[in-house]
């Protein structure tokens, strides 16, 4: 059945509209009835066996917490070792040319990292006086007077990256 409007022939819009309303109304009514039945069932269930339900809920809660804690505590720790930096190796001819020994070169690398004399001594397992001697030798071999100048000069010569 078609409705004739001022723009021509249209499908039965009124019929579709009422059909949608009817379907929606019956759907809502059925949902309300299902909810009412479940509510009444729950009311009778709670009244008859309420203590068992509460104990079951508490047991389920504690079981869940126990499983979660067990997984949390027994999960292996993943320790990722720090990635070591690629060790810079200077040209041996530069070391021979300046006369820097391998131990003095280690002290020079630690100077470049900004460590103090005591920290260098602790890291290399030597005494503080030994570090001071190596530092003094480095200063004379690089022809500098300060630590920062020694690091700068070593970079210029290609001893440090």
Image: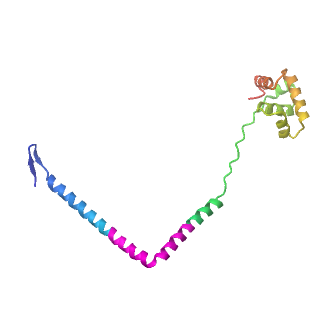
Residue 36 x, y percent position in the rendering: 32, 70
Q: Which residue shows up at 72% across the image and 41% down it?
A: 84
Tell me if 159 is positioned left or right of 10 in this view: right
Q: Is residue 98 above or below residue 54?
A: above
Q: How many numbered dots are placed on residues in this image?
A: 0
The quadrant of the image that shows the N terminus is bottom left
Q: Residue at x 57, y 64 (%)?
A: 65
The residue sitting at the bottom extreme is: 48
Residue at x 66%, y 52% (from the top left corner): 78
Q: Residue furthest top?
A: 143
The magenta segment is 35-63
Q: Tell me which colouring the rendered structure shows.
A: rainbow
Viewer-closest of 159 and 117: 117
Give the quadrant of residue 47. bottom left
On the rendered image, what quadrant is the C terminus found in? Answer: top right
Residue at 88 percent of width and 23 percent of height:
140
| 90 sits to left or right of 46 | right
Residue 4 placed where, x, y %? 8, 48
Query: Residue 143, how many percent across, how many down?
Result: 85, 20
The answer to if 60 sits in the magenta stretch is yes
Q: Is residue 157 magenta?
A: no
Q: Main secondary structure of the magenta part?
A: helix
Front one among 84 and 144: 144
Q: Position of residue 151 (x, y in %)?
A: 78, 26
Judge left or right: residue 35 versus residue 147.
Answer: left
Residue 59 falls in image quadrant: bottom right
């Amino acid at each position: 059945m078609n409705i004739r409007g001022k723009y021509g022939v249209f499908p039965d819009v009124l019929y579709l509209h009422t059909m949608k309303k009817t379907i929606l109304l019956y759907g809502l009514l059925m949902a309300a009835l299902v909810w009412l039945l479940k509510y009444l069932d729950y009311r009778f269930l709670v009244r008859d066996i309420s203590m068992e339900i509460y104990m079951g809920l508490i047991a389920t809660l504690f079981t869940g917490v126990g499983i979660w804690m067990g997984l949390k505590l027994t999960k292996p720790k993943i320790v990722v070792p720090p990635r070591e930096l690629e060790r810079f190796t200077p040209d041996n001819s530069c070391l021979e040319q300046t006369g820097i020994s391998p131990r003095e070169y280690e002290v020079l690398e630690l100077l470049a990292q900004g460590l103090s004399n005591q920290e260098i001594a602790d890291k290399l397992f030597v005494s503080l006086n030994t570090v001071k001697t190596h530092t003094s030798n480095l200063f004379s071999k690089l022809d500098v007077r300060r630590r920062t100048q020694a690091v700068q000069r070593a970079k210029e010569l290609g001893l440090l990256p």
